Amino acid sequence: MNAAAWALNALNVSILNITIVLVVVFVKMDLLCILNSSPLRPRTPLPPPLPRPPICREKAPDLTRDQRRDIRLLREIGWKYRDIHAFTRATTNQIRTAVGKATPRKKTGRPPLLSQAQIDELVDFDCASAKNRRMTYTQLAEALDFGVKRDAIRTALTREGFHRRLAMRKPPISPTNQKLRYE
């Protein structure tokens, strides 16, 4: 083997080694980019945390017979659920129920003893003063005289988002703390 062939062979081997090293480096760089820890690719900021859902979700208002009819008609002419939702503001479950069932059923369960006007009066009375706010359910039933007992008052107020709990008194403050507070 002459010197030129030997030099060419050595050059090919060194080019092959450089190529392998470059491939390994680029593979490592790609892995680092995938993991978002490479200085070559800017790190994407994390999205803001989602707000916590409310403790109790409000029930969507019931659909009327005409709204159900309209939803069924829109679905029959080829609208998708999301288009119907955008147009009518009905929930997906309401749309699915309206499309699947021909006639709505009567509401099940015992009807409330208090009318909506009485519930509004009860809430207004309850919010009128701190004394009214601290009344027990039995005292509220006696004060308003709707002809119902404490359970109906409790159910109505709970449905409106009110809760009763014991009102605790603040402990007395020591004389030294009183002086510090005024200074």
Image (tube, grey):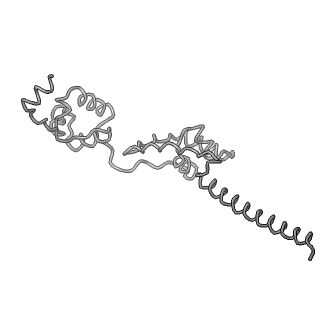
Q: Quadrant of the C terminus?
A: top left
Q: Quadrant of the N terminus?
A: bottom right
Count of numbered circles on the image: 0
Please tell me which residue is depicted at 64% across the width and 46% down the height of the picture: 80
Q: Is residue 9 left or right of residue 134?
A: right
**146 relative to 78, above or below:** above
Please tell me which residue is depicted at 22% across the width and 44% down the height of the picture: 151
**150 relative to 180, above or below:** below
Q: Which residue is situated farthest in the bottom direction here?
A: 1
> Is residue 131 or residue 76 the one in the foreground?
131
**82 relative to 124, above or below:** below
> Is residue 59 or residue 44 the one in the foreground?
44
Percent coordinates x, y for residue 136 in the rendering: 16, 38
Dividing the picture into quadrants, the one containing residue 53 is: top left
Please tell me which residue is depicted at 24% across the width and 39% down the height of the picture: 153
Percent coordinates x, y for residue 79 in the rendering: 66, 44
Q: Which residue is situated farthest in the left direction here?
A: 175
> Is residue 46 or residue 41 the one in the foreground?
41
Q: Which residue is situated farthest in the front direction here?
A: 3
Percent coordinates x, y for residue 94 in the rendering: 52, 47
Percent coordinates x, y for residue 30 in the rendering: 67, 56
Dividing the picture into quadrants, the one containing residue 52 is: top left
